[in-house]
Amino acid sequence: MNFDVKPELSVVVPVFNEQDVLPLFAQRLRPVLDRLGVSYEVLAVDDGSRDATPAVLAGMRRDWPALRVVRLRRNAGHQNALTAGLHRARGCYVVSIDVDLQDPPEVIADMLDLAREERLDVVHGVRTDRRTDSPFKRVTAGLYYRLIRRVVGTAVPRHAGDFRLLSRTAVDALTELPEHLPVYRLLVPWLGLPSGEVPYAREVRAAGRSKYPLARMVRLALDSLTGFSAAPLRVATWLGCAGIALCFVMGGAVLAAYAWGNVVPGWTSMFVALVFLGALQLLCLGLLGEYVARIFTAVQGRPAYVVTEES
C-alpha cells in the first residue's frame, strides 16, 4: 500500500480487549471494503487492551497491508480512542464502527453511496431494530435519547450511535474543536453539516463481552449532559428559586400560627430566617457554578489520550 497517496476511505475501529471477535470482524469487513472498488485504510485503535488483542492485531497486519494499528498507553475510553483514530485518518471519507459486529459492516457501502449521491458530509447509521439488545438496554437507551433530545435539541438523531460516515470537511471540523471530553453522537449533529441516515437492524454481539456496562452508560449520559447543556448547574438555581417561593408560603403559615398564638416565642423569626438564607445560598451557588464550570472547561489542558505506538 502506498502511504504517500491518501485513500478514498478510512475506517476507524476502537478496540479494547477484543481478542475473540477481531478475527470475525476482519472476515466480515475486508470483503466489504474490497468490493467497494476504492482505496482504503483501516485504523484499529487499541485502547490499552490487557488481553491478546495487540498480538491478534499484529498478526492481522501481516496479511492485511491496509490495516494500521494505533496503540494507546492506557485505557482512555471509547470516545477518546475514536478521537485518536479521527486525528490520524487520512481518507476523503471516514467511517467509525465498533468491532463487536452489532453494527453490520455491509452498511458502509450504503453510507458511501448516499454521501456521494446527495453530497452529504455526515451519514448516520440509525438502528431500526434493537430486539437483539436486552430489555434493560432498550429501556435505558430510549430514556437516554429522549433526555438528550429534550435538553440538547432534536438535531440529535434517534437511536444513532457511533456508527457513521464523515466527509473530510466534517473530520477537519471535529479535529479543530478543543474538546477534552467529546461525545460524538452529540458533537457531530452540533456541527450542522448536511446529513442523512441509513437504517439498519442491530445484530447480536459476535463474541466477547460488552464494554459498555451500566457504569459506563451512566458516565456517557453525564458527559452528554454536562458537555452540551448547563441544565445540571441550573438545578441549584431552580432549587434556590423554589426555596424562596416556599419561604414566602411557609412565612405566611408561621405568621398565621403566630397570630393564633400556637408557636414558641422566637420560633417564627428563626424559621423564616433559616429557610430564606438556605434558599439564597443555593441561588448564589447555582449562579457561581455557571461561571466556575466555564472556567474549569477552559483551563483543562490535559491530553485525552497518549499514543505509545503507531504502525
Image (cartoon, helix red, strand yellow):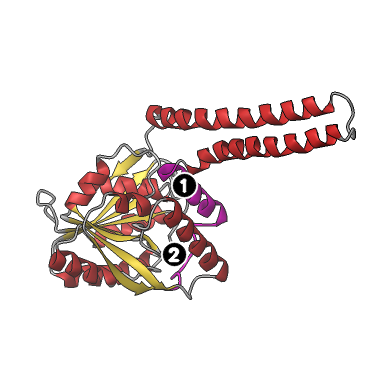
Mark 1, Cα crowd under 10 Å, few <14 / some 14-19 / many 20+, is some
Residue 209 within the magenta-colored segment of the rendering:
yes
The answer to which image quadrant residue 264 occupies is top right
Q: Residue visible at 25% across and 68% down?
A: 108
Q: Nearer the viewer, mark 1 or mark 2?
A: 1
Give the Cα separation between the discs numbered 1 and 2: 34 Å
Q: Amino acid at mark 2?
A: Asp
Residue 120 in the figure: left or right of residue 19: left
The residue labelled by disc 2 is 20
Secondary structure of the residue carrying tag 1 is helix
List the residue tagged with mark 1. Answer: 225
- Image: 109 above or below 71: below
What amino acid is at disc 1?
A: Leu
For residue 311, say whether it is visible: no
| Region in magenta | 203-229
The N terminus: image quadrant: bottom left
